[in-house]
Amino acid sequence: MTNSKFTAGVIPEMQRKYIHKLASQGTRVDGRNFDEIRKLTITKGYIPRAEGSALVNLGDTRVLVGVKIEPGTPFPDTPNMGILTTNAELAPLASPTFEPGPPGEEAIELARVVDRGIREGHAVDLEKLVIEEGEKVWVVFIDIHVLDYDGNLFDAAGYGALAALTNAIVPASRYELGDDFSLPVQHYPVPVTFAKIGNWIVADPNLDEESIASARLTVTTSEEGHINAMQKGLCGTFTYEEVQKVINMSMNIGAKVREIILGDSNVKED
Amino acid sequence: MGMKSDIKLIDDNGLRIDGRLPNQLRPIKMEVGILKRADGSAFVEWGGNKIIAAVYGPNEAYPKHVQEADKAIVRARYNMAPFSVDERKRPGPDRRAVELSKVISEALESVIFVEKYPRTSIDVYIEVLQADAGTRVAGITAASLALADAGIPMRDLIVGCAAGKVDDVVVLDLNKEEDNFGQADVPMAIMPRTKEIALLQMDGDMTYEELTTAMEMAMDAAKKIHEMQVEALKRKYIKEVDEDD
C-alpha cells in the first residue's frame, strides 16, 4: 500500500532525507504544522440512492462511504441488537499500486479499524434496531470506497463512515415495517492517525510521509474524551511517552474534526 | 468486548473470577524447540491458551516479486485450529486472522535485523491449538522464542502482554470471561530492554488515566514474561551443552 514498484529504492531514500530535513526545521512537505490535518471537506448525502452516504476529501485523499440498511436475522448471542458490518474496497482507480480482486490485508485492516471505532464507541444504538427480538433486526452495512489515495485512509474512511451514519435513514416503509426513521446515532467516535518520521510525529500523514514513516498509530476518541480504539501499524516502534502524546493530540484534533462532521456547512443534495 | 451480562467480574475482595489480583498474570509455561522440522519452534501455555509457533528461514523469498532488495520480509501467519474455540471455527483465515497476521508480522519485523538477509523471507507460523483470550500476545511471545531458537539475530526478545478494564477496574491479562464481558482490552508487544512498543491495539472504552495505567501494567508484566522466556531458552540450550560433554 505504501511503496509503488516504481518508487521503491532510491526515491524513497531521497524523499526520506528531504522530509527529515523539513521536519528538523519544524515543517512538512505541504507546509503544515506537525499537529495539523489537511483540509477536510465532507459532503453528506452524496449518493441519494444509499440510505446514508458521505464523500470525504482529506487533502487529496478522497473516500466515498455508503450505508445500506436492510432487515436480517440477528446473531444468536445478541438477539436484541441490530447488526453492523463494515467493508472496504481499495478500487484500482485510486492508485497505481491498488490491484483488482478480493480485499487484501490492507483493505481488511482498514475496514476493521474503522469498524472498531464505530462499534466500540457505540456510535449506533444497535438496541433500537430490533424489529422482532431474536427473529428480525436491521443490518447496517458500511461500505468504504477509496477513490483517490494520497495517504491516511484510516481517518478519511472513519470520518466518512461516521458522517454517512449520521445522515442515514432506516428504510422501514420499503419493507412494510412502519415509517422510515433516522438511524439512531448516539456517539461520535473520531479517529486520528499519526505517523512517526525519524523522531518526529505528524498528524494525518500524506502519501509522501506515509511511504517513509517507520510507524503509524491511530487513536479513536469519543466526545467525552474517552479512548475507544487504537491500532499501531508498520514495523517501527513507539515509546510510552510518544503514545501518551499521540493520545492527547488525537483528542484535541478529534474534537475539531467532530465539529466538521456534525456541522451544517456540508452540502446536502436531495 | 462489551457484551452485556450480569456476571460480576470483580468480587467484593477485589479478586477476579479466577481468583487473581488485578495485576496478576495467569500461569504461563514455555518450552523451546518442540518441533523437529522447523528451524525454530516454541510452545506456550498461557492460562487456557495452548499455542505453538514455528519459524522457517531465512530462505529465498518466493514468489520472487515479494523479495526486497535490501532486507528480509517477515511473514507471520496467525491461525486458529477449528477446535480451539467453543463453536467450531471454519478452517482458514478469517478477516480477524488476516489483520492479526499483519500486525504481528510488523511487530516481529521491528525486532529482527532484517537488513542482514536481503531477498529472503522469514516465515513465522502461529497455531492456536486452544484459545482462551489473549491469543495474539501469547502467540507473539511464542514466536519470539521460536525466532531465537532459529538463531535469527534480534534487537531484543519481544514480549506480548495485554491489559484491560473489567467492572471499572484496570486489570492485567484478561481471561475469556473478562474478554467477553469486560469493558476494554489493550494487547501490546513490548521490547523489554528498551521498552519500545511494537504492537499496540485497543478496543473498548477507557479514560486517558485508565489506558495509561493499563499500558504501564502490561509493560511491567513484560519484564516477568521476558524472564520466563530467558529461562525457557536456557532450559533447552544448557541441557544440550551438558549432553555433549
Image (cartoon, rainbow, N blue to C red):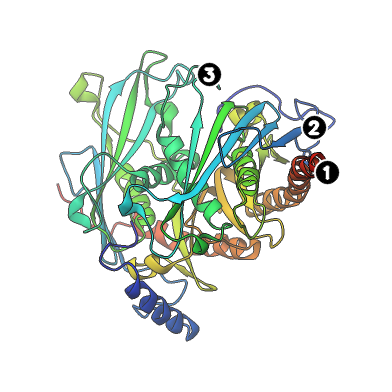
Q: Nearer the viewer, mark 3 or mark 2?
A: 3
- What is the chain letter for disc 3? B
Q: Secondary structure at mark 2?
A: loop
At a point 80% along the width and 32% down the height, the residue shown is B20
Q: Which residue is mark 1?
A: B245
- Farthest bottom residue? A25
Q: Who is closer to the viewer here, A26 or B108? A: B108
Q: Can you see residue B118? A: yes
Q: Are marks 2 and 1 on the same chain?
A: yes
At a point 16% along the width and 43% down the height, the residue shown is A48
Q: Who is closer to the viewer here, A100 or B59? A: B59
Estimate the x, y position of residue A31 in percent, counting from the top left.
36, 80
Q: Who is closer to the viewer here, B146 or B4? A: B146
Q: Is residue B115 above or below residue B36?
A: below
- Farthest front residue? B245
Label whose residue precedes the other's in the sequence (3 or 2): 2
Q: Who is closer to the viewer here, B7 or B84? A: B84
Q: Are marks 3 and 1 on the same chain?
A: yes
Q: Which residue is mark 3?
A: B83
Q: CA distance from mark 2 to mark 1?
A: 44 Å
Estimate the x, y position of residue A211 in percent, counting from the top left.
37, 66
Label whose residue precedes the other's in the sequence (2 or 1): 2
Q: Which residue is mark 2?
A: B20
Q: CA distance from mark 3 to mark 2?
A: 27 Å
Report the side of A152 relative to A200 (left or right): left
Q: CA distance from mark 3 to mark 1?
A: 43 Å
